Amino acid sequence: MRRSSFSPDAQDALVEARTLTLAAGRPAIGSGALLVACAGDREGAGLLAVAGIDGRMLARHLRLDPGNDTGAASPATLLAAIGIDLAEVRSRLPPVGTAGLELRRSRLRPLRLTLEGAGRPVPFDAQGRKVLEVATWHGRRERRPARPADLLRGVLCDGRDPVCATLAELAGGRLRDLFAALFEGRRPAA
């Protein structure tokens, strides 16, 4: 899968999903991190707003909220105990962009897809890989790079994914409006 398969906004969403995954201490980028990252994009946030969903609500329900207290001490708390201010460290680091971003597929294990660049490589889990495959398929079908809306389509295409079930639960009766906006290209009347 090539980097050119994704629009700049979708590449930013991939970087954000990587950041959310690492901050949550998860071993692989999943569909939940991709969904929350899409909610942070203007296009994705607009589409999710059709169903009455915002990014913070998703992050809280999917346990990807940076402020989510799981009982373990946060990295900021642990570093503060030894006199290091995490906010100061982050302010001095160069911004993580999409310049070195690369999606790699293992030759020996072709179902293993990793996001490399600006840090250690982070693999995608099975659901995250499905989201990427569906998003690139939608982009190719329209003869353009995949956009954040395509990533959102990828999340919704796997009804067995628990993230899709969470999205359906949060949207309630307005899930049909989200499907209409995504798959039929129309916005429902208010």
Image: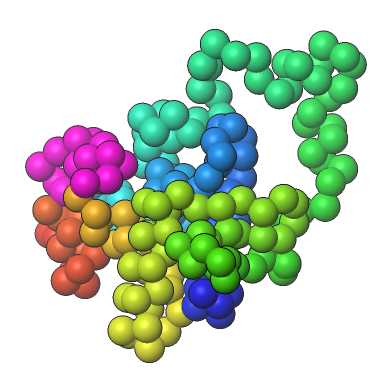
Q: Quick check: can you spot residue 53?
A: no
Name which residue lies at 45% across and 62% down.
111
Name which residue lies at 47% across and 56% down.
41
Q: Quick check: can you spot residue 178?
A: yes
Closer to the camera in the image, 117 or 84:
117
| Magenta residues (range) | 160-175
Name which residue lies at 80% across and 20% down.
79
Toward which corner of the image does residue 8 lie, by quadrant? bottom right
* Residue lying at the far front of the rendered structure: 108
The quadrant the C terminus occupies is: bottom left
Name which residue lies at 84% across and 35% down.
89
Q: Can residue 164 be found in the magenta stretch? A: yes
Question: Residue 156, percent across and down?
Answer: 25, 55
* Residue lying at the far bottom of the rendered structure: 143
Question: Residue 11, percent across and down?
Answer: 56, 65
Total numbered circles: 0
Closer to the camera in the image, 104 or 19:
104
Question: Residue 110, percent across and down?
Answer: 49, 67
Question: Residue 149, percent across and down?
Answer: 36, 64
Toward which corner of the image does residue 171 lie, by quadrant? top left
Query: Tell me, what colour scheme is on the image?
Result: rainbow
- From the image, give the main secondary structure of the stretch colored magenta: helix
Q: Position of 182 compared to 110: left or right?
A: left
Closer to the camera in the image, 160 or 55:
160
